[in-house]
Amino acid sequence: MPPFETPFVLMILWALIGYGLGSIPFGLILSERLGLGNLREIGSGNIGATNVLRTGNKGAAAATLLLDALKGAVAVLLAHRISGDDAAQLAGLTAFLGHCFPLWLGFKGGKGVATFFGILFALAWPVGLACGITWIVAVAITRTSSMGALFAAALSILWVFALGEPRMFILSIMLTALIYWRHWPNIQRLRDGTEPKIGKP
């Protein structure tokens, strides 16, 4: 972790800003505006890009992926520019929490993968790129989005050291733990061989 140099009150403010940005449910908003139905009643019921793809609208899924990544990146970049790296990492973490546990959706949000990538790219783009490539390779082999997420998250802990970003070590552990927690039902389905492939209901 970076040294904590930002005043406590400002850190609390960045935590709230990060949470607020992260909790914007772009998947729900886009699916509603485009008449794609209620995501809560489609596929896994998740509000992320993978479930938006199950509506059959690839454009909406891509837009959800991009916007969910951007909200994490914006939280990090704003905090970093105004306050510093300590605030940036905190804002990134709370943006992730906001996506996964949004107050106005009864704390039932997404699984945070796109937001995870946005946070990493904004903090250190080589780490974000390495995790993105890890996701692509894992998905290409398994055709399963959750496997890509699990591999990318786990290897992020190694990538931060391999690419000279040890300041992100604690954050990467926390984000990885949260991604595995949010993917626990997927892990059980992977173990049972019932996890759906990408593009399948």
Image (spheres, rainbow, N blue to C red):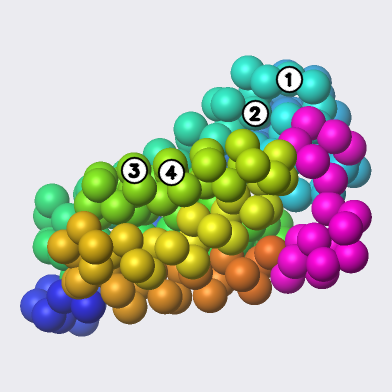
Provide the residue designation for mark 2. Answer: 61
Q: Amino acid at mark 2?
A: Ala
Inter-mark Cα distance, 3 to 2 = 20 Å
Q: Cβ–Cβ below 8 Å for labels 1 and 2?
A: yes
Inter-mark Cα distance, 4 to 3 = 5 Å
Q: Nearer the viewer, residue 189 or 124?
A: 189
Q: Cβ–Cβ below 8 Å for labels 1 and 4?
A: no
| 171 sits left or right of 195 in the view | left
Above or below: residue 185 compared with residue 20 = below
- Give percent across and percent down for residue 126: 25, 47
Identify the element where label 2 is drawn.
Answer: helix
Inter-mark Cα distance, 1 to 4 = 22 Å
Whether residue 113 can be seen here? yes
Q: Residue at x 35, y 48 (%)?
A: 130
Numbered disc in front, either 1 or 4: 4
| 3 sits left or right of 25 in the view | left
Q: Amino acid at mark 1?
A: Asn
Q: Nearer the viewer, residue 54 or 92?
A: 54
The residue carrying pointer 3 sits among few (fewer than 14), some (14 to 19) or many (20 or more) residues within 10 Å by Cα, namely: some
Which numbered dot is residue 57?
1
- Give percent across and percent down for residue 180: 61, 70
Q: For the magenta stretch, what is the residue range?
A: 184-201
Provide the residue designation for mark 3. Answer: 129
Badge 3 or badge 2: first in the primary sequence: 2
The residue carrying pointer 1 sits among few (fewer than 14), some (14 to 19) or many (20 or more) residues within 10 Å by Cα, namely: few
Provide the residue designation for mark 4. Answer: 132
Inter-mark Cα distance, 2 to 4 = 17 Å
Whether residue 104 can be seen here? no
